[in-house]
Image (cartoon, rainbow, N blue to C red):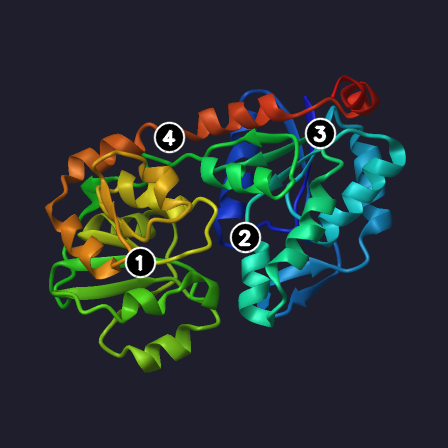
């Protein structure tokens, strides 16, 4: 199959959306499919307000239309709601091409936190954006239920995976100058990640933060005792996971949280609030604690088996994620018949 994958989120960005899309594209290619990304690196771009490392395509409509037509895809998937996603949606509707979309990010909550825009306004716009899609792929069961109550239709499950060869407890090592237990967070340092809720906790041992972002300087000033390790990738990132004792996830807005699976695969129990993402990833497995008191959850995790955490993470594979993605796609020429059947 030829698949046109349209996304405003792509390399060199480092986030869960990019990791999901690039990994699924690689898995699909390994299964013999041809994935043609339509991404910001092919356009003139401007920095996204408050996220300068995210580049937004400038007036991409005509080029997106040409790239889709030249690809002559069997399937079109629009992964994001940015300028490229809007241009692809407009072209598909104009041409009568069926397409799927995906919901990756609690964009309304982010906009509300940064600019004060009411979430009902942004959700109304998102509902309009996704309404023509023949399928809206959503990772977490709780988010699927929430979107359904908000009037989203044609919702399809699309889970996530983890690279269990990279994220491995065997990489565990000591940080000589960092007392244990080590409570770790891996995150972009931004307001929507609720990072201060972790950094302000009174915990024994040490708190460690891996990642960078617009709030990093502020967090360093406010919490000088925290070990800020900067941004790490690949095996070096995996070593940080494996070498900690508890993974703390204070976010209230993530739709899934790939870092949860990476931590579990590394043998780390997860302490988090009882919200979407942690509830969906952990389920009823004894691999973490969810509590409105994050300190109590973090301390309780010290008694959890690292082997149990690893075993739970091994249930999530990227190959299965890619197969589910491929199964959710719809033929581009089936728009009319799909609407009729519905």
Q: Which residue is mark 1?
A: 185
Q: Residue furthest bottom?
A: 221
Q: Which mark is residue 316?
A: 4
Q: CA distance from mark 3 to mark 1?
A: 37 Å
Residue 168, horizontal then vertical, whole percent: 25, 39
Q: Name the disc covering residue 256, or none.
A: none
Give the mark, 2 or 1, whose residue is nearer the N terminus: 2
Q: Are marks 2 and 1 in contact (CB under 8 Å)?
A: no
- Determine whether label 3 and label 4 are within 8 Å by CB: no
* Disc 1 crowd, CA 10 A, few/some/many (<14, 14-19, 20+): many
Q: Position of residue 320 (x, y in %)?
A: 46, 24
Residue lying furthest front: 149
Distance CA(mark 4)–CA(mark 1) = 21 Å
Relative horizontal placement of residue 6, taking residue 274 as reference (left or right): right
Q: Mark 4 falls on what kind of element?
A: loop
Q: Is residue 63 above or below residue 36?
A: below
Q: Nearer the viewer, mark 3 or mark 4?
A: 3
Query: Mark 1 and mark 3 in contact (Cβ < 8 Å)?
Result: no
Q: Residue at x 18, y 59 (%)?
A: 182
Give the residue displayed 14% in from the left and 39% down from the top: 305
């Amino acid at each position: 199959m030829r698949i046109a994958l349209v996304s405003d989120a792509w390399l060199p960005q480092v986030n869960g959306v990019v990791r999901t899309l690039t990994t699924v594209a690689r898995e699909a290619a390994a299964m013999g499919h041809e994935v043609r990304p339509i991404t910001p690196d092919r356009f003139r771009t401007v920095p996204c307000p408050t996220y300068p490392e995210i580049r937004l395509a400038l007036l991409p409509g005509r080029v997106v239309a040409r790239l889709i037509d030249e690809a002559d895809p069997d399937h079109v998937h629009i992964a994001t709601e940015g300028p490229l996603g809007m241009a692809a949606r407009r072209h598909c509707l104009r041409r009568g091409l069926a397409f799927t979309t995906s919901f990756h990010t609690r964009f309304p909550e982010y906009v509300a936190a940064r600019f004060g825009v009411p979430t009902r306004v942004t959700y109304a716009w998102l509902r309009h954006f996704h309404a023509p899609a023949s399928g809206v792929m959503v990772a977490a069961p709780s988010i699927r239920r929430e979107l359904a109550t908000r009037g989203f239709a044609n919702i399809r499950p699309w889970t996530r995976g983890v690279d269990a060869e990279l994220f491995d407890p065997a990489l565990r090592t000591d940080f000589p100058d960092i007392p244990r237990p080590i409570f770790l967070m891996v995150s972009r340092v931004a307001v929507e990640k609720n990072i201060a809720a972790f950094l302000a906790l009174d915990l024994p041992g040490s708190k460690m933060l891996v990642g960078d972002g617009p709030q990093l300087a502020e967090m360093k000033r406010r919490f000088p005792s925290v070990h800020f390790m900067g941004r790490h990738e690949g095996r070096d990132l995996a070593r940080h996971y494996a070498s900690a004792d508890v993974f703390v996830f204070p976010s209230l807005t993530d739709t899934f949280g790939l870092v949860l699976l990476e931590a579990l695969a590394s043998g780390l129990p997860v302490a988090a609030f009882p919200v979407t993402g942690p509830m969906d990833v952990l389920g009823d497995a004894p691999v973490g604690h969810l509590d409105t008191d994050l300190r109590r959850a973090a301390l309780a995790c010290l008694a959890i088996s690292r082997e149990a955490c690893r075993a739970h993470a091994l249930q999530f594979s990227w190959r299965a994620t890619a197969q589910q993605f491929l199964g959710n796609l719809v033929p581009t020429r089936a728009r009319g018949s799909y609407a009729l059947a519905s």
